[in-house]
Amino acid sequence: MTIIVTGGAGFIGSNFVYYELKNHADDKIICLDKLTYAGNLETLADAQGNKNFKFVRGDIADREAVYKLFEEEKPDIVVNFAAESHVDRSIEDPELFLRTNIIGTSVLLDACRKFGIKRFHQVSTDEVYGDLPLDRPDLFFTETTNLHTSSPYSASKAAADLLVQAYQRTYKIPATISRCSNNYGPYHFPEKLIPLMIINALHDKKLPVYGKGINVRDWLYVEDHCAAIDLIIRRGTVGEVYNIGGHNERTNLDVVKTILKILGKGEELIEFVTDRKGHDQRYAIDPTKIFNELGWTPQTKFDDGIKKTVAWYLDNRAWWEKIISGEYKNYYAKMYDNR
Ligand code: NAD
Ligand code: TYD
């Protein structure tokens, strides 16, 4: 089978490329990625030598380029990871999020319509459900929870989900959608909570916790997410949405303190800073459907996954040092200086 993985030079997409090459040695993987600030060819260095892997630089919103790729490669499956993915950036500048996340998805769907496809899989997020209150630990997102978004990022992802469902119904595109909770693990771009805190702590720099640090996220080790998507594209039912998450809820403050403990650093590094606008309180997934239908359960417990992740950042300094010494410096100064 030929699988196009869009956004495969980013965090989760690259982990998925490696997962597929390892677990389905007969399949051909084509990574289509624009290489934005978040995409990194070095992340795919270990895949480049594999005869079943090909990298194509391109924009999912570029209709001509996408059609050309479909015509040449005749993919059986498309897994769409490509997105602008950072909530804070979407608050600063929403427009790019609409272009990539919505228009880009529609171009891919049009290509599926024009050239045919066995499966289109949209990698979505639990953020399309909005948030849950902190004082109702009994509540979880299910696949039938209403879409109720808070940020330009989540609104753009919800719009893309609705388009996928519209194309599925109107044009019979065989599509599936997965909505996953927060991921962590290797190749996570340094702007996100966990890598940012690891890297700052290693430099004895302040750890900027938004608000009071009481917001809750449901953390999933990235390989578990990849395994779930792999099951959905091969055995999932067309037209269905699957929530992915592992009952690993932690407050941001707990996560940051755990990282400090693993690194042997003191909590005086924590600094409470101005809260994110519209900050979602709590995300929590009910994964019953994917467990019942596909037998998926997360394999990595948070306490083990976070240790593995810290170890990865210690072992792969060159990967992130290059990132934080470039354009990222301006981003960091803009977002955090005088916050
Ligand atoms: P990321 O920002 O690390 O990577 C995004 C990748 O997409 C980059 O390689 C980038 O170059 C590429 N890209 C961006 N715009 C593109 C375009 N127009 N055309 C082609 N490529 C483009 O993101 P991530 O954290 O790996 O997230 C991947 C997907 O998973 C996203 O769709 C995101 O919404 C979803 N998701 C992420 C999380 C999470 O915790 N990170 C959780 C649930 C769902
Ligand atoms: P993030 O990694 O941006 O993921 P998301 O917004 O998609 O959940 O943020 C995770 C949580 O950490 C979120 O509640 C915001 C918080 N946060 C901080 O407190 N400080 C930071 O510097 C960052 C980047 C995030």
Image: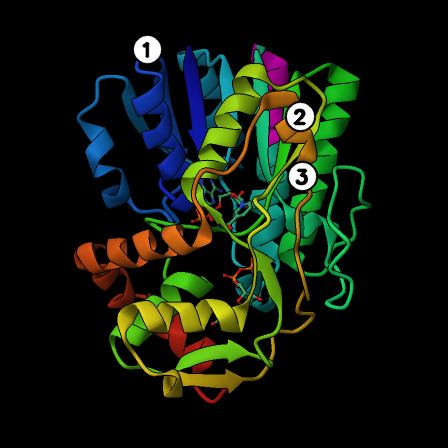
* Vertical side of 85 occupied by 143: above or below: above
Foreground disc of the pair 3, 1: 1
**Image location of residue 133, percent across then percent down:** 76, 65
At mark 1, the secondary structure is loop
Label at residue 292: 2
Kind of residue sitting beneath label 3: Ala
Residue at image position (61%, 14%) is: 114
Kind of residue sitting beneath label 2: Asn
Magenta stretch: includes residue 111: yes
Q: Nearer the viewer, residue 66 or 271?
A: 271
Asked if residue 171 lies left or right of residue 27, the reply is right
Q: Earlier in the sequence, mark 3 or mark 1?
A: 1
**In the image, which residues are magenta?**
106-115
Please name the residue that numbered disc 1 is placed on.
Answer: 26
Look at the magenta stretch and give its main secondary structure: helix
Asked if residue 34 lies left or right of residue 50, the reply is right
* Vertical side of 199 occupied by 269: above or below: below
**Image location of residue 272, percent across then percent down:** 51, 85
Q: Earlier in the sequence, mark 1 or mark 2?
A: 1
* Vertical side of 174 occupied by 163: above or below: below
Residue at image position (69%, 37%) is: 161
- Numbered circles on residues, count: 3
Q: Quadrant of residue 321?
A: bottom left
Kind of residue sitting beneath label 1: Asp
At mark 2, the secondary structure is helix
Q: Distance from label 1 to label 2 (Cα)?
A: 28 Å
Please name the residue that numbered disc 3 is placed on.
Answer: 160
- Residue 119 is at least partly visible in this image: yes
Q: Nearer the viewer, residue 285 or 208?
A: 285
User: Label 1 CB, ligand 1: below 8 Å?
Assistant: no
Q: Quadrant of the N terminus?
A: top left
